[in-house]
Image (cartoon, rainbow, N blue to C red):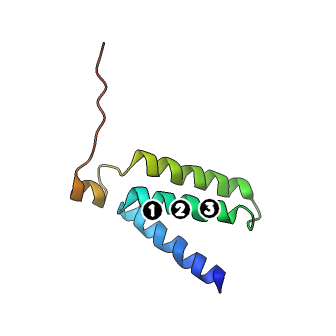
Amino acid sequence: MQSAALAAATAGVAILLFAGLWTPIAGSLAALVELRNIFSADSPWTCILLAALGIALAMIGPGAWSVDAHRFGWKRIDTQDR
């Protein structure tokens, strides 16, 4: 039963990430799910890669075409020349 709940949580997080909705929260949840899967998967390196991608996405934030960007505005970092 726990694996069905984990699969449903993974599908929900994937939908949120695909739509770009609640990106920092969804990226963090994806990282947590993948870190839990490290011990139960055949290939732990795939889970480590996906966890790292979830953490990076949570820290970078949504893209320009995401729902978050349309709702809250897309934050862009401009570097200044010295």
Disc 3 to disc 1: CB gap under 8 Å: no
Disc 2 to disc 3: CB gap under 8 Å: yes
Give the CA separation, mark 3 to mark 1: 12 Å
Picture residue at 26% right of the left edge, 47% below the top: 74
Disc 1 to disc 2: CB gap under 8 Å: yes
Q: Which mark is residue 26?
A: 1
Q: Secondary structure at mark 1?
A: helix
Q: Which mark is residue 8?
A: none
Picture residue at 42% right of the left edge, 45% below the top: 60
Q: Amino acid at mark 2?
A: Ala
- In the picture of the structure, the residue carrying the numbered disc 2 is 30
The N terminus sits in image quarter: bottom right
Q: Residues within 10 Å of mark 2 (few under 14, many from 20)?
A: many
Q: Secondary structure at mark 3?
A: helix
Give the CA separation, mark 1 to mark 2: 6 Å
Picture residue at 59% right of the left edge, 55% below the top: 50
Q: Secondary structure at mark 2?
A: helix
Q: Amino acid at mark 1?
A: Ala
Question: Would you place residue 20 above or below residue 77 in this image?
Answer: below
